[in-house]
Amino acid sequence: MTQIVDFANSIFKPLIDLGAAPLMMIVLTLIALIFRVKFSKALEGGIKLAIALTAIGSVIGILTTTFQSALTAFVKSTGISLSVTDVGWAPLATITWGSPYTLFFLMIMLIVNLIMLVWNKTNTLDVDIFDIWHLSFIGLLTMFFGANIFIATILVVFVGILKIINSDLMKPTFNDLMGAPESNPMTTTHMNYMMNPFIMIFDKIFDVLFPWLDRFDFDAATLNRKIGFWGSKFAIGIYLGIFIGLLSHQGMKEIFVLSFTAAFTLELFSIIGSWFIAAVEPLSQGITDFANSKLEGRELNVGLDWPFLAGRAEIWAAANVLAPIMLLEALVLPGNKILPLGGIIAMGVTPALLVVTRGKIIRMIVIGTIELPLFLWAGTLSAPFITQTAKAVGAFPKGLSASTLISHSTMEGPIEKFLAYLVGNASKGQIEFIIYAILALAAYLLVFMWYAHEMKKRNIAYKEAAEAK
Amino acid sequence: MFKILAACGAGVNSSHQIKDALETEMKNRGYDVQCDAVMVKDITEDMIGNYDLFTPISKTDLGFNISIPEVDAGPILYRMPAMAKPVYDQVEEAIKNS
């Protein structure tokens, strides 16, 4: 055994010593080649990933360095200790894709998906390769809290299977929300929809106690049109620069620096995000071709990234209204350490609200307000892991104080992060954690099964309505 | 130059796939097109006026009347050439009609 490990180390150690960016360039290129992507395309993807990793590191550096002294002063003058910088989704996705484990979890989930298709346990082929990072994040977090790769993989597969089942359950609702015909194959296994069971509990409470609130639903598209550019990324950067600048008693000049820095870094994060999505593109096509060749032309639903619902105005109206609400919650929520910035437009929160409530905007906002603390807590819980991983892949500036942490305020899958925490700690053998982990997993599964039952009722109603026509 | 506007959630993933696919395929068919990818949230009436064609993933409610032609580009995301072809044909048609 030690000989095998030594042998593996002698090959991999020099590669790992090169640093994350060159390592991932080589690994991604090789994996794409295995899926018969042309060499030049495979290498192009590998290089794009490496430059995205390098770039995101420098931009995080600019943002955190610029805000460091203002945030320290902010804590002093307000007494509010929000020490974690919210960098939004793009740096987290890049950092997660900077770990070779992400490709390992991707391969595992590809096999799980194909087995489920062959056994007719699902009708969805997931081609949203890029978003595997949500699951990989859970796996890596579980290991951070103490699990070995085997236990982390089991948790990833468990959540992954539920995600695929969920894509089938939601399919008719997607058609309804898009006004699409039965033949439309779009669905999604996106992690944000794993909040559906939780949201449905509150939706049912709404049905019983506050159905009259639905009368106050307003036209979401009109609200969005009025907000216009005031809700764009750079505008949000400006507000938060002013907000932090004023509360930390900075001068006029410093406030402008903070505002413009926040604005341009938020814009750059998503531009760099688009590079590494492009980096994974050849591999995504290669895997899709491979999976389709194994399934011999079977008619399947196709699992995409969530934004085929982005045309629904409620997603953006709810996100716009929830942004200031979240900022207030972050200031007063016990145990929260994140000051919302990069994740303040809660794209990882509102699509699930739309699917469960089917566009009842007041419900989306009220339930969103109730569930946002979970996201803030999960983001706080993950901050040490994210910071450590960012350091490991060289995406963290060296000059910063050791206490500086980064995270994401509205990352999809908060409940799964708590599971990762419990399972990770349980793996270390402490009996309390083993009991908590078992109870939590059982509750998670039971609520999902209840939700699945409710969704099947909903889907039968859709079918009957279609037949009645 | 024929200008196309694609849109999705973060303006980086789905809309970029559509952008890359349309630019590549239309170039192969001999047309000079430029496609921009943005967040649905960031589209304004002024912005859309600068384009010749709007290619959302599916039906999109922007809160105002879309003054330019539209083609649903969702099938490009399925990554199967046969399903993307009708989208390309419609886009080509829109270019010819412009």
Image (cartoon, helix red, strand yellow):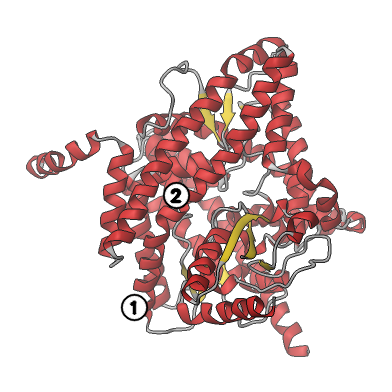
Q: Horizontal placement of A192 versus A4: left or right?
A: right
Toward the viewer: A282 or A88? Answer: A282
Residue A97, image x, y percentages? 40, 46
Q: Horizontal placement of A272 versus A41: left or right?
A: right
Which part of the image, by quadrant, shows the C terminus of chain A?
bottom right
**Considering only vertical position in the picture, is A68 above or below A422?**
above
Tell me which amino acid carries mark 2: Phe
Residue at the limit of the structure toward the left, as seen here: A3
Disc 2: which residue: A276
Disc 1: which residue: A294
Toward the viewer: A12 or A82? Answer: A12
Residue A258, image x, y percentages? 65, 23
Determine the CA span between mark 1 and mark 2: 28 Å
**Considering only vertical position in the picture, is A38 above or below A346?**
below
Residue A28, image x, y percentages? 31, 52
Residue A23, image x, y percentages? 28, 42
Q: Horizontal placement of A81 versus A125: left or right?
A: right
Q: Residues within 10 Å of mark 1 (few under 14, many from 20)?
A: few
**Between discs 1 and 2, the one toward the N terminus:** 2
